[in-house]
Image (spheres, rainbow, N blue to C red):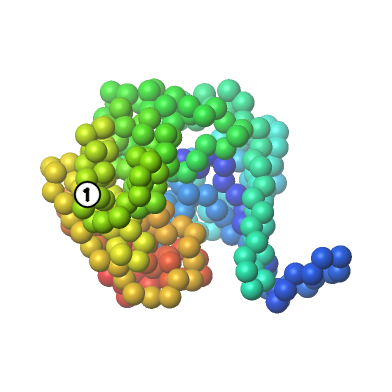
Amino acid sequence: MIYTVTFNPALDYTVTTNSVTPDIINRASSADIHYGGKGINVSAVLTMLGIPNKALGFVGGFTGRELETMLNADNISCDFIRLENGLTRINVKIKAGQEIEINAPGPEISDDDITKLITKLSKMNSGDYLVLAGSVPKNLPPDIYNRILNKLKGKDINIVVDATGKLLTETLKYRPFLIKPNRTELGEIFDTEIKSGTDVENYAAELQRMGARNVLVSLSKNGALLLDESGAIHRIGGIKGTLVNGVGCGDSMVAGFLAGYVNTNDYEYALRLGNACGAATAFSEALATKDKLKKYM
């Protein structure tokens, strides 16, 4: 079973208009609302791929109830901690020639709420997968990843981390099954500029020496590189297309990789499916669909 954690999920309200002018009423040509959050994106793509999974995290108020309703409508299994106070945030995205994003803060999360989440995670079984994705919001302690992983230590859980900087490197002592930095994030970790494929290999190997079992580096239009736990390097090229949606591409790659590996135990196939899922999201208005995935596989 695969579990994903989204600490600060959201409803994303996207408004499209020709232009935005201050001090007058601006009228939208279209509007849409969708669920958001890195872990939720992973769960959505896993569900599309037919992989059993459950989305965990925190929700509050009427917006939290609506988010759960929307996930259930898409057959995405979830088991969120319901907060007594506060609302699941609404992020506003305005498309008016250029895109304006306004991300709201999330609700306050108490130590009791964190304990409830960790208790749920402690019931995971040996061999299960746990996906921790994204930054830690201000309403949570900065060491929340470490708190969770310390509680799961010794339970033989396959940890997947898609985070940046110190948040990622501090998880390496727990021997995560998979980490997925992109090229820029890889350079930031080591305070250097990644100039070549050899640089990608060398710094991926350094992350492996620091504790990661498998290192998947997404390279945008140039595909991806995987350094697997045996030390083998797998490369895949980019897929040609017009970028439509930059949100959720990395999450889709993680989901595709996990689905491919869970089904086959084959790293080459997992990399191929992950790459195709990332492209299927990049070249779509929303997350990857089965039709898009078939095309890019």
Q: Residue at x 59, y 59 (%)?
A: 34
Residue 153, position as x, y percentages in the image: 32, 24
Can you say whether 62 is above or below 207 in the image? below
Q: Looking at this rendering, what residue extends furthest in the right direction?
A: 23
Q: In this orientation, which residue lies closer to the viewer: 269 or 163?
A: 163
Looking at the rendered structure, the secondary structure element under dot 1 is helix
Q: List the residue tagged with mark 1.
A: 201
Query: Residue 189, how many percent across, how many down?
Result: 37, 40
Residue at horizontal 22 percent and vertical 34 percent from the top: 209
Determine if residue 157 is in view: no
Determine the image quadrant of residue 238: bottom left
- Residue type, label 1: Glu
Q: For the residue carrying disc 1, how many other residues have a C-alpha within 10 Å: few (<14), some (14-19), or many (20+)?
A: some
Whether residue 233 is visible here, answered yes or no, is yes
Left of 53 or right of it: where is 67?
Answer: right
On the image, the x and y values in percent for residue 264 come to 19, 53
Q: Position of residue 48 (x, y in %)?
A: 39, 61
50 with respect to 64 (left or right):
left
